[in-house]
Image (cartoon, grey):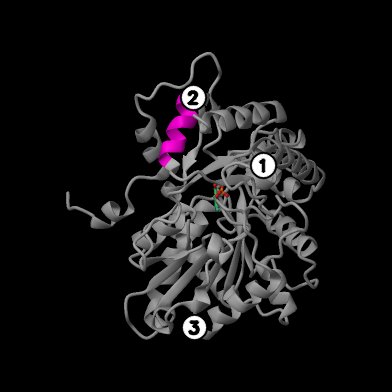
Amino acid sequence: MRDNPGLDLLGDYPFQRLAALLEGVPAAEGVAPIMMQIGEPQLPQPDFVAGEIARNAHLWNRYPPVQGSNDYRRAATDWLTRRYQLPAGMIDPARHLIAGCGTREILFQTALMAVPSRGAANGGGRPAILMPNPMYHVYYGAAVLAGAEPVPVAATAETGFLPDFAALDPALLARTALVYLCTPGNPQGAVASLEQLQDLIRLARQYDFLLALDECYSEIWRGAPPPGGLQACAAMGGDMSNLLVFHSLSKRSNAPGLRAGFVAGDEEAIARLLRVRSYGGAQVPGPVQAAAAALWRDETHVDENRAHYNRLFDMARRILGNRAGYNDSPGGFFLWLDVGDGEAATLKAWRHGAIKVMPGGYMSREDPVTGENPGERYIRVALVHDADTAEAGLTRLATALEN
Ligand SMILES: Cc1ncc(COP(=O)(O)O)c(C=O)c1O
């Protein structure tokens, strides 16, 4: 079999690297290990989920429509319209929105869809895909496997944990096919303002790249609800060209195992993505779409979740407050702690506290300009448990880091 050098460029997935780092390292004895390395919400889903799946069991016999059922797309459209106060009719569920199995797959396929055509249209040169650094690793993998040049752009304390794409070399922007941005961000939880989103949409149109806004943490916030890309479009007159937004039930509704999300925005990009998905995308199973539609229609559980996360952040502030550069983030459920050496702190947390965390350096890549990995000083800690487990985890982490 021929080699595929792209796969070498990808390297191991962060969770594999973490497993290798901790291999053979004993966890602290006498306490149950707590998994704070992964963003898997541990609270239950609303009771009606199981009922909806059972009620729609007849749909297991049908291939689900690739674009999603009419009812699912209607529920997602109505949710977007309510959440971002969009003008009625701005989103047509038949033209502007398709279902996805969560968001990972559709984020990945967006690179497959965007690279050759947009890259070629942008006047030659190797198509580039820009992304924040640190990043959700799928952006990097998608860029490499789509044959584009992945360009990580610093999102550090100095830049307010958001990348400054507009400051890049115009020659790079001219060959950019796609830009990924996550707001609220994973891992740092920074939120782009409405003005920043509008500026970025203008930049996308100026250079004719596609902007993929990953908004899967949009419902987990402290203070004010994060603005969204479609809201920015509405504020600029309603045109959604060059923009796609991605939403998921994994974080909003504690349902990472359900695999339900959607992508919405630019009509042409949606049609192209649907074509890619018709050939190589997994459909969301019919009974799952029915349960997912019910979840998009319910806000009670989302409000309760948010209140729970807010209590966990109050707890984190109390326990870690003056350690590791603790900083309240406006969104998401991760702590991004400046511990000086992320790998060393990860080993300590495991050895002395039986707490698993993610070294920040595994969430980021070498900066193409400075050659430095901006995540190396950090660890990422997921606050996704019930209050007692989170309190035990944070307390043991605080003590372990002092070793
Ligand atoms: C930033 C970000 N985007 C997308 C995803 C994908 O989640 P899902 O496919 O479950 O929607 C994740 C999951 O952790 C994430 O952290």
How dense is the environment of label 3, judged by Cα within 10 Å: few (below 14), some, or many (20 and up)?
A: some
Q: Which residue is mark 2?
A: 352
Query: What's the mark number on residue 321?
Result: 1
Residue 156 position in % (x across, y down): 52, 60
> In the image, which is nearer the foreground, mark 1 or mark 3?
1
* Secondary element type, mark 3: helix
Q: CA distance from mark 3 to mark 2?
A: 51 Å
Q: Residue shown at 45%/25% (left/top)?
A: 351
How dense is the environment of label 2, judged by Cα within 10 Å: few (below 14), some, or many (20 and up)?
A: some
Whether tag 1 and tag 3 are in contact, CB under 8 A, the answer is no
Q: Which residues are magenta?
A: 343-352
Kindly report the secondary structure that dominates the magenta region of the rendered protein: helix
Amino acid type for the residue under numbered disc 2: His
Residue 382 position in % (x across, y down): 59, 40
Q: Is residue 192 above or below residue 327?
A: below
- Going from the N terminus, do you reach mark 3 or mark 2 first? 3
* Secondary element type, mark 1: loop
* Secondary element type, mark 2: helix
Residue 133 position in % (x across, y down): 46, 60
Q: Residue shown at 77%/55% (left/top)?
A: 223
- Going from the N terminus, do you reach mark 2 or mark 1 first? 1
Q: Which residue is mark 3?
A: 207
Q: Is residue 118 left or right of residue 160?
A: left
Q: Is residue 346 magenta?
A: yes
Q: Is residue 370 magenta?
A: no
